[in-house]
Amino acid sequence: MKVVILCGGQGTRIRDVSDNIPKPMIPIGPYPILWHIMKTYAAAGHTDFVLCLGHLGHVIKDFFLNFEAFTGDFTINLGRNREIEFHDANGVEGWRVTLADTGDAAQTGARIKRIQQYVAGEENFMLTYGDGLSDLDLGALQDFHESHGKILTVTGVRPPGRFGEIECDDKGQIVEFNEKPQATGGRISGGFLVCRPELFDVLDDREDLVFEQDPIRKLVADGEMMVFEHDEFWQCMDTARDHHLLNDLWASGQAPWKIQE
């Protein structure tokens, strides 16, 4: 199944981390978060990717044009007959990556519409964003989607808490502080979706078309959306705090999304 990844946003809320590379290229450990997302899909057997590029898309193009050099060791013989020998197996055998310019200012609905040609003929395709990680069972997600026959399946997650929970005595002295493991409210979209091609019927090419607004509302009204519930790890990278959290998990060897080679 093809995997469409939205990689074109402006990333305004995380520019204190970096403002000269697109958000999907911000590193978690040694590699961009986009690499981590793609590794997750590839481990489930989905190795045909369509990247919807926009803001600073040339940085993502450069990464894939020089993928072996960015992700492994190599020896280069300089001079007139330059030769490069790559030494590492980087675990991407068979990956196919289509890099599609979908407009610098386009919103998510327009970006998806503009890659329609690259998923033509597919019975279903996967869709996600270039800034979220999870230990989601993608096989179970696919099976659920195929079982109900609706146009769109959204993964519903419980958002992690962003603030510490404190308890104090009657004098105001803090007696306990707990980093909230998750919010106690309802679910939100975790950004891992599966779509039937009829999705394109509710999309158009308008620059300002936001997928998460009118198109989603139309699908809901028509009874064409289902939710796949996921209660384990999920974390987006919206802010510098999120970036630090994901990097700490990776550095500690406790990253729940990490694929064991």
Image: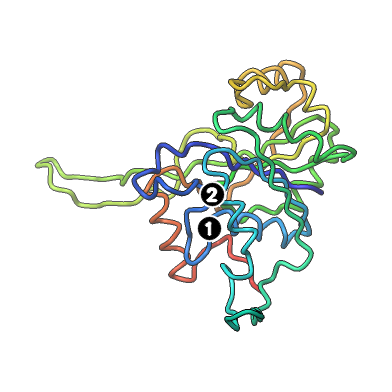
Q: Residue at x 38, y 43 (%)?
A: 15
Identify the disc placed on residue 32: 1
Mark 1 is on which residue type? Pro
Under mark 2, the amino acid is Pro
Furthest residue to the left? 171
Residue 124 horizontal/vertical position (percent): 83, 40
Residue 117: x %, y % from top left: 81, 35
Q: Residue at x 62, y 52 (%)?
A: 61
Q: Nearer the viewer, residue 34 or 169?
A: 34
Q: Is residue 75 visible?
A: no
The image's colouring method is rainbow
Q: Secondary structure at mark 1?
A: strand
The residue singled out by tag 2 in the image is 24
Specify the quadrant of the image occupied by residue 218.
Answer: top right
Q: Where does the C terminus fall, quadrant-wise?
A: bottom right
Q: Is residue 25 above or below residue 197?
A: below
Mark found first going from the N terminus, 1 or 2 = 2
Task: Give the quarter of the image for residue 54.
Answer: top right
Q: Residue placed at 49% from the left, 71% from the top?
A: 253
Residue 250 falls left or right of residue 76: left
Q: Residue furthest front?
A: 80
| Mark 1 neighbour density, 10 Å: few (under 14) some (14–19) many (20 or more) | some
* Of the pair 61 and 161, the residue shown nearer to us: 61
Q: Quadrant of residue 215?
A: top right
Residue 230 seen from this side? yes
- The x and y percentages for residue 16 are 34, 45
Q: Is disc 1 in contact with disc 2, using a CB cutoff of under 8 Å?
A: yes
* Relative image position of residue 181 (x, y in whole percent): 43, 50
Q: Which residue occupies 52% across, 53% down?
A: 25
